[in-house]
Image: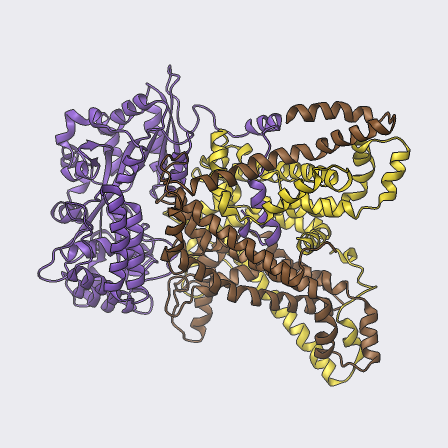
């Protein structure tokens, strides 16, 4: 590949003399590789080689090794599809998504409407809500785990509860009732609401003012009616984007679970489980790869179905 | 801050209805709106308050029964303590994160912009196939290729090195995809003029296209930098030697360590977000644009 | 990786980018490579005259001074340069991925399981220990032996016990518990507004699962490799752990894990499950007010149980310098008795695996430390190398479901047994 790149560089400089149609076409092919080649080589090496390798591993008994010799056919897939832990990680994800997707949607839209509706200090509010985007899940998890939702008397949440005479709650350790969802959901909300709010604000600002004017002429009442019949329908594209991005991001949740609750079987999304199978002490790379590929297929189907339904992803 | 960002005057969402109606209902709505805004603002700022408070407290203050709103004495020495901790080389980690952020962002932008331009503008029979190859990678989740990527990188001998952190991340299908979409909509007239002047693709790209796309590039760069700075799982696995830890990995080791030193942890958290907060303050305009671009077209 | 980032969509792809890359950027790579800060003899290596460089991995010990000590030992070795890698955080995962690549450690500390032997991660070390084998605690030999070959040199023994405050028990009018039921009663009695009765980890006491099993008279596996943790009495013991958890007298959500004495020292709990390593820190705070006890027996037919954990030194089969690595292990963990003594007694406390050294360890011969040593000698059990992490995970999941969710012990045990049996069939079948 590098040979091609070199020769096209040489040729690319020559094209600037611009001599005739035939040269132009040949030059354009070389120019194409000059522009696309480096990226493409990298994508193949670091993108496709690992995918193929993963596929290979998934058909072997690959424990503690990445160059296995013991071919087992589809056994790893069968194992994963019947592995209660893997299945329950899917359930965990589903529960998580049921909380996080609608909440993120509603709250980020709400924030966008609030921020967009004020005339003064709009940039200030936007900045405040957007600022958490600068924080990583590691930082946020640390604040949540040690300072807000720890289970002892000096956690912020417990301090507030104690003002009302309520006993300390071990937020991250209590499964009955499942309090651990509160830190897990709120940390993601805090981190990502600002991001989706910006998307909604951008969407709001693309709505032509004339539509509102026309609505008022027709006697629409400000507030809910206008939102219901003008604003919300106009936000359709944005809404779909937010839902889909949100869902995919939730599917790949790892960091807050890893840092807040670790590898526990009651709050273990697919990625955390696969990480523990492959790279944790179990080191079963064959089953880990099989599980990952199953997950990939599910996400692809999900994406395709969604884009089929909503027509998402078409260039605008 | 950047009030100029949006064409707020020309098109606005809901403000119209508010200005439109008067009377007590509107006033109530207005008060409710402001109350909601202020309460939400406070809630959003609580974690930042906790970072500052805990970072400048003694552990005794933090763990004291009864909430101490402010530390009884500001412990500026905590900062020095962090940087003198031999177990977690924080200064080194900051440097690594900066290098990874800058080189990773620059390299990724360069490669993706060139590829995007080539795919958008240079006719070639392989263009469609390559585009599909790129789009396909967008749908495959991280976990699938995580282990083999690690093995590949380690067989190249890049574990615990900055190249292992940076290079595999340079080839973003998503960035290439965004640039292609962007260049497809780029006004053709400019390039045609350049053609007439006898410029080839290479010089057209660098002399005409890039200089006219700087806001878009800045937007993508800002978002990429933040993503690089905050990346966790890959640096966690690649950074085996503490000399190659990024800030996030260093922080995480504090949290999962056998012994926890609470105030030091929060100093570290504060130090780790400071660069990004500064970027936010100065580049907010591009960030907002970047989020809007990447989100909508993703 | 991407789920991480708030910039959701973008960051998802960020990860994908990580799987992209370009070898043709060699020059760039080389430029970055200069910054890795991994000098051949850095990190405490050194030692003159030899070109051999060995990499030695430790997890992070919590006690101050341990890292410096590890560096000091490495530096004192003159036959090879030894790089010490000190690993805070998730050591198990780092080690697992390190051992997959050929850039991993030459020498590492861990605990042996048979999968490591079968996948050829470690080399036998019989030849370097043969002359002093009899001086090692017999348990420490068994736990590192698979099919008659010894794969690791035990560095330290860490019995895990329950620490308690004598004064608090006295005040409540209680004697140290001798059965699980008494433990539950004591934990309840010691719980008040500011303090919980017992701390055994934020997971609700999974660390006590093994000891509870042994206290009922069971074991993980039988001698001929069959699951042995699902008997009637074992199930009773698990139920008791649930009872303890449900009594609301256990500390949960502490900022430090059970491996750190922080919760006990900060008086968040009156008793804590933790290893001998924490003894110096605890004595420093409470002095004579500290007592230790084994995990109490299930009932009169049971027996007290002390889990003898610890760390073992291994030589990686992927090392390019296996012989040099073995020589270093022999030197540090067999020949250099002064370093072993230092490592066992100067920071946290550990029992030296060498009987001759343990006998000389003055600091372990008085007070609570002496009690702990005696309890370990009388009731200690060690890991069975046939009990693999996969079975351990199944066992842990079972405990979580029983302890925290109050699930039916018999049903949960049956699930864990099935997983373990499948694993055993694969290993020995």
Residue A162 in the image, given as x and y percentages of width and height: 42, 71
Count of numbered circles in the view:
0
Outermost residue toward the left in this view: C301
Query: On screen, A215 above or below A274?
Result: below
Q: Chain C is drawn in which colour?
A: purple
Residue A264 in the image, given as x and y percentages of width and height: 38, 56
Q: Colour of chain A?
A: brown
| Colour pattern of the rendering | by chain
Q: Residue at x 69, y 35 (%)?
A: A36
Q: Nearer the viewer, residue C179 or B266?
A: C179
Q: In which quarter of the image is the C terminus of chain A?
A: bottom right
Q: Which residue is drawn at 61% across and 54% down?
A: A133
Residue A155 lies left or right of residue B218; in this view the side is: left
Residue A300 lies left or right of residue A267; in this view the side is: right
Residue B28 in the image, given as x and y percentages of width and height: 69, 81
Q: In which quarter of the image is residue A308?
A: bottom right
Q: Residue at x 58, y 54 (%)?
A: C6
Query: On screen, B170 above or below B69?
Result: above
Q: Colour of chain B?
A: yellow
Q: Which of B1 and B118 is in front in this view?
A: B118
Outermost residue toward the bottom in this view: B24
Q: Quadrant of the N terminus of chain A?
A: top right
Residue B58 is at least partly visible in this image: no
Residue A88 is at least partly visible in this image: yes
Q: Nearer the viewer, residue B296 or C127?
A: B296
Query: On screen, C88 above or below C3?
Result: above
Residue C176 in the image, given as x and y percentages of width and height: 16, 60
């Amino acid at each position: 590949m590098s040979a091609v790149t070199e020769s096209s560089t040489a040729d690319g400089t020559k094209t600037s003399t611009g001599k005739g149609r035939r040269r132009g076409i040949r030059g354009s092919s070389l120019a194409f590789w000059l522009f696309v080649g480096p990226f493409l080589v990298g994508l193949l090496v670091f993108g496709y080689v690992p995918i193929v390798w993963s596929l290979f591993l998934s058909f072997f008994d690959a424990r503690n090794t990445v160059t296995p010799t013991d071919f087992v056919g589809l056994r790893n897939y069968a194992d994963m599809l019947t592995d209660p832990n893997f299945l329950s990680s899917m359930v965990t994800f589903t529960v998580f998504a049921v909380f996080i997707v609608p909440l993120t949607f509603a709250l980020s839209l709400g924030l966008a409407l609030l921020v967009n509706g004020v005339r003064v200090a709009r940039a200030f509010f936007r900045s405040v809500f957007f600022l958490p985007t600068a924080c990583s899940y590691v930082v946020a998890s640390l604040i949540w785990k040690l300072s807000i939702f720890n289970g002892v008397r000096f956690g912020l949440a417990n301090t507030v509860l104690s003002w009302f005479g309520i006993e300390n709650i071990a937020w991250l350790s209590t499964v009955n009732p499942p309090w651990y969802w509160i830190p897990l959901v709120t940390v993601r909300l805090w981190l990502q609401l600002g991001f989706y709010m910006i998307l909604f604000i951008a969407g709001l600002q693309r709505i032509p003012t004339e539509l509102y004017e026309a609505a008022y002429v027709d006697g629409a009442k400000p507030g809910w009616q206008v939102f219901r019949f003008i604003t919300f329908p106009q936000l359709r594209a944005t809404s779909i984007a937010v839902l889909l991005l949100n869902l995919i991001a939730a599917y790949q949740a790892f960091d807050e679970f890893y840092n807040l609750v670790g590898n526990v079987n009651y709050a273990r999304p697919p990625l955390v489980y696969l990480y523990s199978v492959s790279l944790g002490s179990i080191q079963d790379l064959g089953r880990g790869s099989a599980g990952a590929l199953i997950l990939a297929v599910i996400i692809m189907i999900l994406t395709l179905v969604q884009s089929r339904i909503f027509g998402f992803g078409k260039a605008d | 801050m950047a009030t100029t960002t949006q064409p707020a005057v020309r098109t606005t969402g809901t403000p119209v209805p508010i200005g439109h109606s008067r009377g007590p209902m509107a006033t109530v709505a207005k008060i409710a709106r402001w109350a909601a805004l202020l309460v939400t603002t406070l809630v959003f700022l609580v974690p930042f308050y906790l970072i500052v408070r805990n970072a400048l407290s003694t552990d005794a203050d933090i763990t004291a029964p009864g909430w101490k709103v402010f530390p009884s004495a500001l412990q500026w020495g905590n900062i020095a303590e962090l940087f003198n901790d031999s177990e977690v080389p924080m200064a080194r980690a900051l440097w690594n994160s900066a290098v990874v952020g800058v080189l990773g962002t620059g390299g990724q932008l360069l490669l993706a912009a060139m590829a995007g331009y080539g795919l958008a503008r240079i006719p070639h029979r392989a263009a469609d196939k390559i585009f599909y190859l790129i789009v396909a990678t967008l749908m495959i989740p991280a976990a699938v290729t995580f282990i083999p990527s690690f093995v590949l990188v380690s067989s190249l001998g890049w574990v615990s090195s900055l190249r292992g952190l940076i290079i595999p991340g340079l080839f973003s299908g998503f960035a290439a995809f965004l640039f292609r979409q962007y260049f497809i909509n780029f006004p053709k007239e400019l390039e045609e003029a350049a053609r007439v002047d006898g410029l080839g693709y290479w010089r057209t790209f660098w002399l005409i296209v890039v200089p006219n796309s700087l806001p878009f590039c800045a937007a993508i760069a800002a978002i990429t930098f933040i993503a690089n700075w905050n990346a966790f799982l890959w640096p966690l696995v690649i950074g085996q030697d503490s000399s190659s830890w990024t800030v996030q990995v260093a922080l995480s080791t504090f949290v999962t360590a056998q012994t926890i030193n609470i105030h030091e942890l929060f100093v570290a958290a504060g130090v780790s977000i400071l660069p990004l907060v500064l970027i936010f303050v100065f580049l907010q305009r591009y960030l907002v644009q970047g989020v809007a671009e990447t989100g909508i077209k993703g | 990786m991407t789920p991480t980032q708030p910039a959701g969509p973008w960051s998802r792809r960020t990860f994908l980018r990580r799987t992209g890359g370009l070898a043709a950027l060699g020059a760039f790579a080389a430029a970055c490579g200069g910054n890795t800060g991994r000098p051949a003899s850095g990190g405490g290596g050194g030692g003159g005259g030899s070109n051999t460089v060995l990499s030695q991995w430790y997890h992070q010990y919590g006690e101050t001074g341990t890292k410096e000590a590890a560096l000091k030992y490495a530096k004192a070795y003159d036959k090879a340069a030894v790089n010490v890698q000190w690993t805070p955080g998730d050591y198990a995962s780092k080690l697992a991925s390190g051992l997959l690549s050929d850039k991993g450690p030459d020498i590492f500390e861990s605990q042996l399981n048979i999968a490591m032997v079968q996948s050829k991660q470690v080399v036998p070390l019989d030849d370097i220990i043969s002359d002093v084998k009899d001086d090692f605690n017999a348990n420490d030999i068994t736990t590192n032996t698979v099919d008659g070959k010894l794969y690791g040199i035990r560095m330290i023994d860490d019995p895990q016990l329950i620490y308690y405050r004598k004064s608090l028990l006295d005040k409540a009018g209680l004697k140290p518990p001798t059965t699980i039921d008494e433990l539950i009663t004591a934990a309840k009695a010691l719980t008040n507004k500011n303090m919980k009765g017992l701390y055994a980890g934020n997971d609700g006491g999974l660390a006590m699962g093994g000891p509870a099993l042994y206290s009922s008279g069971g074991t993980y596996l039988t001698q001929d490799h069959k699951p042995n943790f699902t008997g009637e009495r074992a199930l009773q013991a698990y139920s008791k752990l649930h009872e303890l958890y449900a009594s609301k007298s256990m500390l949960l959500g502490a900022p430090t894990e059970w491996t750190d004495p922080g919760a006990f020292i900060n008086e968040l709990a009156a008793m804590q499950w933790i290893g001998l390593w924490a003894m110096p820190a605890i004595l420093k705070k409470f002095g004579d007010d500290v007592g230790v006890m084994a995990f109490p027996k299930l009932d009169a037919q049971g027996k007290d149980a002390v889990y003898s954990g610890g760390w073992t030194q291994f030589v990686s089969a992927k090392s390019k310098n296996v012989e040099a690595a073995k020589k270093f292990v022999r030197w540090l963990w067999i020949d250099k008795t002064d370093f072993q003594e230092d490592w066992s007694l100067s920071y946290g406390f550990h029992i030296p695996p060498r009987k001759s050294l343990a006998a000389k360890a003055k600091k372990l011969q008085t007070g609570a430390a002496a009690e702990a040593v005696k309890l370990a000698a009388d009731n200690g059990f060690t890991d069975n190398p046939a009990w693999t992490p996969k079975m351990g995970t199944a066992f842990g999941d079972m405990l979580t479901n029983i302890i925290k969710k109050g699930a039916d012990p018999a049903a949960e045990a049956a699930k864990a047994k099935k997983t373990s049996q499948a694993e055993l069939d694969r290993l020995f079948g």
